[in-house]
Image (cartoon, coloured by chain):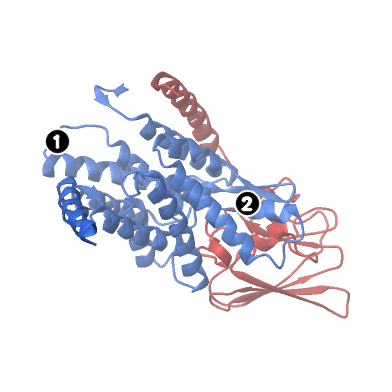
Chain colours: A blue, B red
C-alpha cells in the first residue's frame, strides 16, 4: 500500500498500531503519561531522517521502522525513565540500524542494542511496562499476545511461537515442584513475555527467514534468557537476543557450497565410489 | 488479510489510540501505599485505621496488578509475581504476622507487620521484567496492605 506516495508494508502499520495501542492501554491503566516513549519515538525519527537524508542521500520519507524502534525503546525502558535515557537508547538504536551491518543486513536488533547500552549507563532495568498484565481471577492476563498479528505480518511466527513455547516449557520445568493444578500452569503460560516473543524475536531483519532456523533461533533465545537469568546476569532478555542476533549473522554469512561446487564434488566422489 | 483490510484495521486502532491518549491526558494520579527501593532496609507497620487510609483497594489503580501474598500456600501467579524476591513470614505474640520481603539481587529487605485479618498484596504491573526467577526492574513492584474492610491501610 502507499502512504504519501511511498510503498509501505502492512507489517509496519500493524506493528506501529499495536505497539501504540499497548502503550496507551498501559498508560491509561497505570495513570501515567509516557514522556520517555514519546521522546524515544521523536528522537529515533529525527535521527533516522537525518542519516537517511544526509548520509545515505535518500529522499525524505516517513521512517516507519524508526517509529517502531522508538516505540519499543519507550515501552521496554522503565515508565519513569529519564528523557535522556530514551533519547540515548534511540540514537544508539538508529546508529546500529544504519551502520552496524554485515552484507547490507542489520546485525543487532536496534532497539535491544540501544536499550542495553542506555539502561546500563543509567543503571536502570528493563521494565516492559507497556506489556502490562491484569489480574483476572488470580491469573495475570496481558494484552501483548495481540502482537501476534505483527509477527504474522513479519513472517516470523515460527520464531515467535518457538520462543514462547520454550519459555513456558522452561518455566514449567523450573516450577515443577510447586505446580499443584492446571491453574498454576495457566499462570506460567500467561506470564510469558509475549512482547518479546512477537516483537523483538520476530524482528524480520535480524532473525532467520526459513522455518527451521527460525525455530532454533526462537528456542535458543529463550534458553539463553533462562541461563542468563539464573546466572544473575543483567538484562538477560536483551542480552540473549543480541547474542542470538550474532549467532544468526554467523549462520547467514557461513560459507555455502555453490551449485558448481556440488557438481564438482559429486563428479569426484562418483568414480571413487565406483572404484571401491 | 489483504492490504485494504489492514489499512481499515490500522485506522480503527488509531482512532482507539487517539481516544486513549485523550483519556490518558485527562487521567489522574493514583496513591501508592508503598514502593520497593533497591537500597536500604525499611520497616512498615499497617496502620489499622479503618476507612481513613488511602481509599478502597478494589477501586485503586493497583488492584488489577496485585497478588495476595499473605496466604499460604501462595498461588502460582503470586509466586511468579514475587520473582526475584524472597518472602518470609513469622507469627508475633500479639497475633500479628511479620513479613520480610527481600530483593534477592541485593539482599535489601522490607519488613511489614500485618495485623490479624489484614491482607498483604504484591504489586507487579508486568511480568516481562521477571525472566525465569529474576527481576530486572523495581519500578513496577510494590506492596499494599489492605484492612479487613477492604481499604488501603
- Image quadrant in which the N terminus of chain A is located: top left
- Image quadrant in which the C terminus of chain A is located: bottom left
Is residue A233 placed above or below B3 in the rendered structure?
below
Is residue A9 visible in the rendered structure shown here?
A: yes
Mark 1 vs mark 2: which is more N-terminal? 1
Is residue A77 placed above or below A154 in the rendered structure?
below
Q: SS for tag 1?
A: loop
* Residue bearing mark 1: A58
Question: Which mark is on residue A189?
Answer: 2
Residue A92 relative to residue A216: left or right: left
Q: Position of residue A38 (x, y in %)?
A: 39, 43
Question: Which mark is on residue A196?
Answer: none
Residue A115 relative to residue B66: left or right: left
Q: Chain of mark 1?
A: A
Q: Position of residue A76 (x, y in %)?
A: 45, 52
Q: Position of residue A165 (x, y in %)?
A: 55, 52
Amino acid at each position: 500500500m502507499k502512504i504519501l506516495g511511498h510503498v509501505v508494508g502492512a507489517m509496519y502499520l500493524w506493528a506501529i498500531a499495536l505497539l501504540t495501542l499497548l502503550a496507551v492501554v498501559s498508560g491509561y491503566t497505570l495513570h501515567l503519561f509516557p514522556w520517555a516513549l514519546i521522546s524515544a519515538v521523536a528522537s529515533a525519527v529525527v535521527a533516522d531522517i537525518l542519516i537517511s537524508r544526509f548520509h545515505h542521500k535518500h529522499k525524505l520519507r516517513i521512517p516507519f521502522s524508526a517509529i517502531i524502534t522508538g516505540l519499543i525503546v519507550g515501552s521496554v525502558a522503565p515508565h519513569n525513565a529519564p528523557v535522556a535515557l530514551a533519547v540515548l537508547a534511540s540514537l544508539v538504536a538508529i546508529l546500529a540500524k544504519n551502520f552496524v551491518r554485515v552484507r547490507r543486513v542489520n546485525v543487532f536488533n536496534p532497539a535491544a542494542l540501544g536499550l542495553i547500552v542506555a539502561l546500563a549507563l543509567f543503571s536502570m532495568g528493563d521494565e516492559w511496562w507497556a506489556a502490562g498484565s491484569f489480574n483476572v481471577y488470580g491469573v495475570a492476563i496481558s494484552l501483548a499476545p495481540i502482537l501476534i498479528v505483527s509477527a504474522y505480518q513479519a513472517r516470523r511466527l515460527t520464531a515467535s511461537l518457538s520462543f514462547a513455547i520454550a519459555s513456558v516449557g522452561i518455566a514449567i520445568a523450573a516450577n515443577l515442584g510447586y505446580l499443584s493444578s492446571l491453574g498454576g500452569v495457566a499462570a506460567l503460560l500467561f506470564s510469558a513475555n509475549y512482547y518479546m516473543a512477537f516483537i523483538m524475536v520476530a524482528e524480520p531483519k535480524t532473525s532467520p527467514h526459513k522455518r527451521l532456523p527460525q525455530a532454533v533461533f526462537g528456542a535458543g533465545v529463550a534458553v539463553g534468557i533462562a541461563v542468563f537469568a539464573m546466572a544473575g546476569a543483567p538484562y538477560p532478555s536483551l542480552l540473549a537476543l543480541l547474542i542470538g542476533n550474532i549467532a544468526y549473522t554467523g549462520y547467514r554469512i557461513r560459507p555455502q557450497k555453490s551449485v558448481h561446487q556440488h557438481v564438482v564434488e559429486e563428479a569426484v566422489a562418483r568414480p571413487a565410489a565406483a572404484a571401491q | 488479510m489483504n492490504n485494504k483490510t489492514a489499512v481499515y484495521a490500522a485506522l480503527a486502532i488509531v482512532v482507539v489510540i487517539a481516544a486513549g491518549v485523550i483519556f490518558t491526558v485527562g487521567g489522574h494520579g493514583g496513591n501508592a501505599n508503598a514502593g520497593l527501593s533497591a537500597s536500604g532496609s525499611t520497616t512498615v507497620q499497617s496502620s489499622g485505621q479503618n476507612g481513613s487510609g488511602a481509599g478502597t483497594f478494589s477501586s485503586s489503580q493497583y488492584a488489577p496488578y496485585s497478588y495476595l501474598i499473605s496466604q499460604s500456600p501462595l498461588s502460582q501467579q503470586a509466586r511468579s509475581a514475587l520473582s526475584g524476591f524472597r518472602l518470609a513470614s513469622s507469627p508475633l505474640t500479639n497475633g500479628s504476622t511479620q513479613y520480610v520481603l527481600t530483593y534477592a539481587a541485593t539482599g535489601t529487605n522490607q519488613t511489614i507487620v500485618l495485623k490479624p485479618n489484614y491482607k498483604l498484596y504484591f504489586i507487579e504491573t508486568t511480568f516481562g521484567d521477571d525472566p525465569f526467577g529474576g527481576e530486572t526492574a523495581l519500578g513496577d513492584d510494590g506492596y499494599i496492605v489492605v484492612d479487613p474492610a477492604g481499604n488501603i491501610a
